[in-house]
Image (cartoon, rainbow, N blue to C red):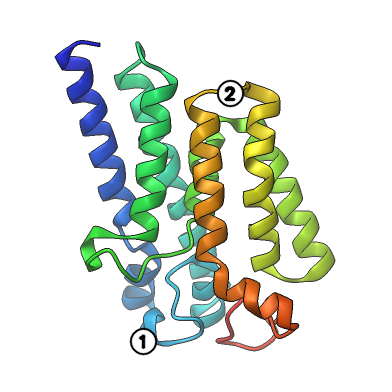
Amino acid sequence: MDGQTILKIFLCTAGAFVLGSVPVGLVLTKLFSSKDIRTQGSGNIGATNVARVAGARLGLITLALDLLKGALPVAAAGLMVPSTGEPAMALAGLAAVAGHCYPVFSGFTGGGKGVATACGVFLVAAPWACLVALVVFLAAVAGFKRVSLGSILAALSLPAGTWFFYGTGPVAAAAATVGLLVVARHRANISRLLAGTEPPFFKKPGQDR
């Protein structure tokens, strides 16, 4: 691997982390509502809390933009560094999700849980595995009315789907890492699920999932 390729991979990875760090939910709620998403509901900047605190429209816009934060850098890495393919895309995807969870603009704290951004990453890097995870997510949410449970189960199914459809390799390793990170970011939700105190989606305005 020559120096120019290494530089391109570095730039793609760094750019993905910066893009992932953009706090879409926080920016949108500040611009289009009088609420600070960090002090209401769960305090999380992700689409679920935005929807509960500031309405479904802003929640959907947050979801779409968080998806793009994952999809765009992975697609760019694939185009900019075609000679390496999977490694460049996997690194960009990991960086985008890490940026969303630990944003540089807020001192690496106060980020989201990474679900939507991870979905964007694997829509590009491993679309069939992402589809499996999405089906698992929708089935869990429909059956149990808990977005957190759907997110956790989807995160666990993603590495298995990636391995099944694409085999082992950098993207599969990235899927396993991202899956574990998403589950770890839901540890408070897991405690509430086990205790039976996790509220259903839209049970009351401002509640966490």
Quadrant assignment, res 75: top left
| N-terminal label among 1 and 2 | 1
Q: Residue 200: tell me if it is visible.
A: no
Asked whether the residues under the numbered discs 1 and 2 touch, taking CB atoms below 8 Å apart as contact, a structural biologist would say no
Which residue is drawn at the image coordinates 22% and 24% (left, top)? 8
Quadrant including the N terminus: top left
Residue drawn at point x = 71 percent, y = 54 percent: 137
On screen, residue 194 versus residue 61, left or right, reads: right
**Which residue is more in the foreground, 25 or 7?**
7
Q: Which residue is mark 2?
A: 168
The C terminus: image quadrant = bottom right
Q: Percent from the top left, x then y, of residue 146?
A: 71, 70
Asked if residue 145 lies left or right of residue 44, the reply is right
Relative height, residue 17 to residue 207 (above, below): above
Tell me if residue 7 can be seen. yes
Residue 164 at x, y percent in the picture:
71, 27
Q: Residue at x 39, y 59 (%)?
A: 101
Residue most extreme to the right: 143
Q: Residues within 10 Å of mark 1 (few under 14, many from 20)?
A: few
Q: Which residue is mark 1?
A: 34
- Residue 98 against residue 188 in the figure, above or below: above
**Front of the two marks 1 and 2:** 2
Mark 2 is on which residue type? Thr
Kindly state the secondary structure of the residue where label 2 is placed: loop
Graded by Cα atoms within 10 Å as few (under 14), some (14 to 19) or many (20 or more), the crowding at tag 2 reads few
The answer to which quarter of the image holds residue 112 is bottom left
